[in-house]
Amino acid sequence: MIESFKDLDLTKEDEAEDIEKKVKEKLGLSFRVMCERLSDYINDNVDLIMEDMINIAPYEDYDLLIEDADGMVEFLKTEVVKEENWKLEGVKSMNEQALQFQFASTAVDDGETFKGFVVVSFAGKIQHAFCQGEC
């Protein structure tokens, strides 16, 4: 448990592995667990996610562009959900009691169009996880 964002002792030089180590040490929470929650959100809310998406270029391969809803749903549920396809982009303080971890999906387009967000309390409990894609 921490009392403030500063208690994580993050520096600008910290890589994702360094951040995860500090988060695990201070909050008892791994990125693997966060990614599992993002995957759960995708599987439970794929119709909502699809409202904002018009196509997907799997792993930035625009020759394989997926434009049909069934194909995009299949790709979201089979590829995007994989832990190895999430890259930490940053962590910030949301308020005086929670942190927001932002992940990018490297499986969708160039990694900039599909994001995952995990809100974690200072006690290390995941409060909310959600994903969103851009058109």
Image (tube, rainbow, N blue to C red):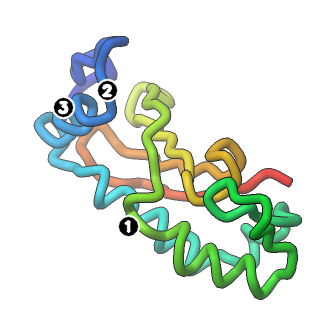
Mark 1, mark 2: which one is toward the viewer?
Answer: 2
What's under tag 3, amino acid-wise? Lys
What's under tag 1, amino acid-wise? Glu
| Residue lying at 58% horizontally and 59% vertically, measured from the top left | 107
What's under tag 2, amino acid-wise? Glu
- Percent position of residue 92, x then y: 46, 27
- The image shows residue 53, relative to residue 89, as above or below, that is below
| Residue lying at 42% horizontally and 54% vertically, measured from the top left | 127
Q: Alpha carbon of mark 3 to alpha carbon of mark 2: how far? A: 11 Å
Judged left or right of residue 60, residue 99 is left
Q: Indicate which disc residue 36 carries.
A: 1
For the residues labelled 1 and 2, say whether their Cβ atoms are less than 8 Å apart: no
Badge 2 crowding class, 10 Å Cα cut-off, few under 14, some 14 to 19, many 20 or more, is some
Which of marks 2 and 1 precedes in the sequence?
Answer: 2
Q: Indicate which disc residue 23 carries.
A: none
Q: Which of 56 and 99 is in front in this view?
A: 56
Q: Which of 43 and 58 is in front in this view?
A: 58
Badge 3 crowding class, 10 Å Cα cut-off, few under 14, some 14 to 19, many 20 or more, is some
Label 3 secondary element: helix
Label 1 secondary element: helix
Mark 3, mark 2: which one is toward the viewer?
Answer: 2
Residue 132 visible? The answer is: no
- Percent position of residue 43, x then y: 56, 79
Q: Indicate which disc residue 15 carries.
A: 2
Judged left or right of residue 37, residue 52 is right
| Residue lying at 82% horizontally and 63% vertically, measured from the top left | 53
- Percent position of residue 29, x then y: 22, 49
Q: Indicate which disc residue 22 carries.
A: 3
- The image shows residue 53, relative to residue 97, as above or below, that is below
Q: Alpha carbon of mark 1 to alpha carbon of mark 2: how far? A: 21 Å
